[in-house]
Amino acid sequence: MRRTPMELAAVASAAVPGLTPTAAAYEPDDAADFDSAVLLDAERKRWRVRAPRHLEASTRLETELQVLRAFSPAVRTELPFLLPTVAGTVRIGELTTFVYSHLAGRVASVEELVSGGTAVAKEIGTAMAAIHDLPIDLVQGADLPSYSANEFRQRKLNELDQAATTGKIPAALLRRWEHALEDVSLWRFNPSVVHGDLHEDNILMDQSRLIAVTGWTDLRVGDPADDFAWLTAVDHQDFVAAVQQSYAEARREVPDQHLQRRAALSAEFALAQWLVRGQAAGDAQMVAEAEQMLHTLESDIAQYGGQPISVEEPVVLIASGEGRTESDSADSDPDPDAGSDTASNSAKVTVDVIPEQPSASNPAADSGSSESIADNDAARDESAPTAQAAHTPSEDHAAEEQRHADDTDTTALQVVPPKQSV
């Protein structure tokens, strides 16, 4: 049951000795996880109270307390924005409610942020760069999660497997995400400190100035692209480009070239994570909402193509009138012996590797070439012995002309027998 602002005010009085709220109002927050309110005391001072709705949300708030304690005064003075300060806590059953000193500024919608133009974009980009340039020791010293690039990719693959077991993820999305996660060239980045839950609700603005960043429950060392995921839904590309430019200029190192692709993947994959959370919590409404958003995403990608999330998009091969997706990872080795039937049946022209000359002791060594190539190899004399005679210049010329034949039809592809010395 959701708690009212007045109920939260009573809880806050127990958390902060001497606090006497005189007014309370609802505060926007993650409705699935927290009940929040803004309080006003007798001295006209403002406070913020956050009460978790379940145990996992309470654990996140306790993690945030650990994070905020890790930000020493010296670190805070280096940041271009303010951080929350925990004024008190109170435990009710298994859940802990937190009261914070109120920060100036207000939450602005995406539309309001975009309307601020380049000035607001620069503020956001600079703030994100400051977060990502924080010393990694700050996170590791606080015993918070820390992942290398490969560990982070493997963690996502494990989450994908878990999401697939629900049976509620469209197959097209599972294939799309798996292809991106197996594309190792996409995951070559330098891990950095990551906010982990950055979006417009955790940014406090005062007109065009970014005053504070809140919501530090998911701080970790990982992929900086995760903090860009919320921007992939912004329709105004000029604004997004301005944020990216400001970010790149403010960072101490050059951002990797695939950051935006991984950000788009992170935004899409968040729907699957939301579904898994809903199912784990037994929240039928949350699961239904996630399913609807997943099917909407699948439809949008099918109709419009979606944002690129892989360095190399899957190759679609049409065989026997049916389509299939080739999802081999970018670093996998091609198999020269694979699928000669695919070469003959597919609408995609595939040139087989010219087989090496078989030895006299193994005359059947080149029998693995495709049937279409064997049928069209009229130049070969079936009664000829394994050790063939050397070609004449005229035969070489004819073979060269045949090799340059129109390759839009697989029947034009001939295997040129290798020359042999007499």
Image (cartoon, grey):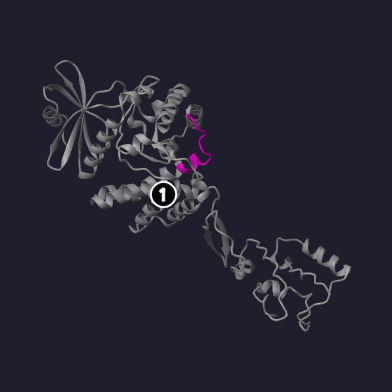
Query: Taken as a whole, is the magenta stretch helix, strand or loop?
Result: loop
92 sits left or right of 106 in the view: left
User: Would you place residue 336 above or below residue 384 in this image?
Assistant: above
Q: Which residue is rendered at x = 45% and y = 46% of the image?
A: 149
Tell me if 74 is positioned left or right of 353 in this view: left
Which portion, as a residue range, is magenta? 251-262
Residue at 26% across, 38% down? 63
Return the x and y of residue 252 as percentages of the image width and height.
48, 30
Observer able to see residue 305: no
Q: Is residue 259 magenta?
A: yes
Residue in the image at 28% along x and 31% along y: 68
Query: Which quadrant is the N terminus positioned in?
Result: top left
Q: Is residue 92 visible?
A: yes
Q: Secondary structure at mark 1?
A: helix
Residue 124 belongs to the span the image colors magenta: no
Q: Which of the two residues, 34 or 187, is positioned nearer the viewer here?
A: 187
Residue ID for mark 1: 151
- Which residue is more in the foreground, 352 or 279? 352
Label 1 sits on what residue type? Glu
Q: Residue 368's image quarter?
A: bottom right
Q: In the figure, 387 relative to 51: above or below?
A: below
Mark 1 neighbour density, 10 Å: few (under 14) some (14–19) many (20 or more): few
Image coordinates of residue 320 in percent, x first then y, are 57, 68
Give whichever of 2, 295 is nearer the camera.
2
**Quadrant placement of the C terminus:** bottom right
Residue 352 point in image, percent of width and height? 67, 66
